[in-house]
Amino acid sequence: MQLEFKLNRLESTRMIGPLVDRHWEEFRTAKQRGEMVAWCSGPLFVFPYAMGMKPHFMAGYASYCATRRAADQVLEAAEADGELPDTCSYHRLHMGMAAAVKKGIPIREDVILPIPDLMLDGRVCTEMSHYAEALYRRHHIPVVAVDMPRSHRESDIPILEAFVEGQINATLIPILEEICGRPYNYDRLSEILDILKKTPVIRNECWEYFKLIPSPWSLWDYGVSLAPVVYLMGKPETIPYYESVKAERARRARELLL
C-alpha cells in the first residue's frame, strides 16, 4: 500500500523569507552605515538593540550558513585556523568566519558578517563561554559575560533573578554606555520588551491549534515561525506576522469542522 502525502503549508509563512533576508542584509551592511555591531549568545540581544546597535543572535548563524550551503566551507576555515572538528559547530562557524575576515581565508561573501564591537555572552550552555573566550583571546573582540544559571526549584527563581539583574546593572549596562558614549536608553528597552512579550502570547495561542485533529498547521510551520523571534528580536513586524498566522490557522480550523 502506497501512502500519499499532501503538503498544505501555511501561506502566512511566505512572509518569513523577505523578513529574514532583510535582517541579514541590514546586519551585513551595518558598519557601512556607521552602526555599531554586537554578537549575542543567549537572550542578551535586547540590551545592545535598545542602544541602536545591530545585534546578531549567534545561534541563527548556523541555519543561515546551512541554507546558503556554506556551512562546510566556514567550518573548514575554522579547522584551517586550528579549531578542533569535535567542538560545537556554533563555535566553529563563528571562529571560522572571523578567521576568514581577519586572515583572508576565502568563504562565500554573503556569509561574512561584520566583526563586532562587542560580544555579549549570556551563558546558558558551557560552549558559549568557550567561544566568547576564544573570540577575545584570538581576535581581540571585547566580551561581556552574564552568567544565567538554570533554576531547579521554584524557590530558586527570585535568587537567580537578582543575581542576573545584578550582573546586568553592574557590568553590562555601564559597558554599553561606555562603548556607545551615551546614557542607556531604558525607554527604548521597554518598547522592545513590550513587543517581545506580546509576540509569544500570540504564538502560544497558535500552539493551541496543535490540539485539533487533524491539525490545521504542522511542526514545519511552527519551526519556520521561530524566525521572527530569533531574527527580528523585538521589531514591530513580529506582531503582524503572528497575527496573520493565527488568523490563517483559525480559518483552517473552521474549515476542518465543516
Image (cartoon, rainbow, N blue to C red):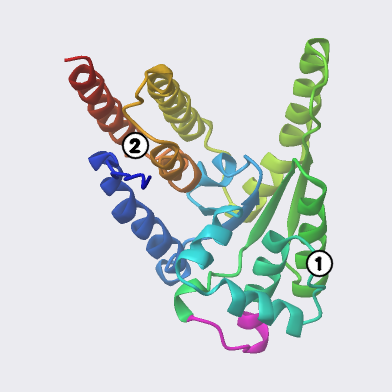
User: Is there any visible trace of residue 37 in the rendered image?
Assistant: no
User: Quick check: 59 left or right of 123?
Assistant: left
Quadrant containing the C terminus is top left
Secondary structure category for the residue under label 2: loop
Q: Residue at x 74, y 73 (%)?
A: 139
Residue tagged 1: 86
Secondary structure category for the residue under label 1: loop
Q: Residue at x 82, y 10 (%)?
A: 155
Q: CA distance from mark 2 to mark 1?
A: 39 Å
Residue tagged 2: 236
Q: Position of residue 82 (x, y in %)?
A: 81, 80
Give residue 250's quadrant in the image: top left
Quadrant containing the N terminus is top left
User: Is there any visible trace of residue 192 in the rendered image?
Assistant: yes
Region in magenta: 99-108
Label drawn at residue 254: none
In the figure, 200 relative to 142: above or below? above
| Kind of residue indicated by mark 1 | Asp
| Kind of residue indicated by mark 2 | Pro
Q: Residue at x 57, y 46 (%)?
A: 48
